[in-house]
Image (cartoon, rainbow, N blue to C red):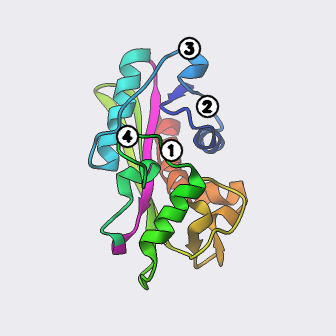
Amino acid sequence: MEILVATENTHKLKELSAIFADHTLFTPHEKGIEYFFEETGETFLANAQGKALALHEQAGSPVIADDSGLVVPALGGEPGVYSARYGSPAGGPNLDTPERNRYLLGKMEGLTDRRSYFVCCMVLVLTPERFFVAQETLPGRIISEPRGSYGFGYDPLFYLNEYNQTVAELPEAEKNKISHRGRAGIRLRAVLDSL
């Protein structure tokens, strides 16, 4: 099946293409669609569903959208739905990844509770009345300096106790099996396979 993915993030598209290997995934840009959705929802579900329905309305074809982020309980749930914009000035450009990671580490300075988890809410829209949702998490903790060269975003700071590595130290295939996005994608792939 051909599926539009509501993103222009090449890292995310690569991850999803591996998870949905039996299907062909495209970005809106690749299909000549000008697409923008402002994420104003207060939950991962609101943002993911909003993105998916908005793109489906434009394209009229199956769409996958996700909203994902990092949650740090000791910071009151920050960065949460603002993960990609965390630390950025209001109305200004987003910080780049190293700056955003330094901002997070600065906020966590002196905190002993470094537990955290990634969240991914993924929505598959076939029609506005027929859609499927999966939300998954990946627990870990934030370390004090980046490690690893794989992955993107907060991956170099996100340490997995059971692997004794950060997510950025895991090979891509391993990450896709255990990550929050991988887990949510596997759930929706099972839905697609059952249709």
Cα distance between the residues tagged 4 and 1: 19 Å
Q: Give the labeled residue for mark 2.
A: 23
The question of residue 68 being in magenta is answered with yes
Q: Residues within 10 Å of mark 2 (few under 14, many from 20)?
A: some
Q: Nearer the viewer, residue 137 or 158?
A: 158
Please identify, in this view, whether the residue under mark 2 or under mark 3 is nearer the observer: 3
**Compared to 50, does 180 lie above or below?**
below
Amino acid type at circle 2 is His
Determine which quarter of the picture holds residue 137.
bottom left
Is there CB contact under 8 Å for labels 2 and 1? no
| Earlier sequence position, callout 1 versus callout 3 | 3
Q: Which mark is residue 190?
A: 1
Amino acid type at circle 1 is Ala
Amino acid type at circle 4 is Ala
Helix, strand or loop at label 1? It is helix
Please identify, in this view, whether the residue under mark 3 or under mark 4 is nearer the observer: 3
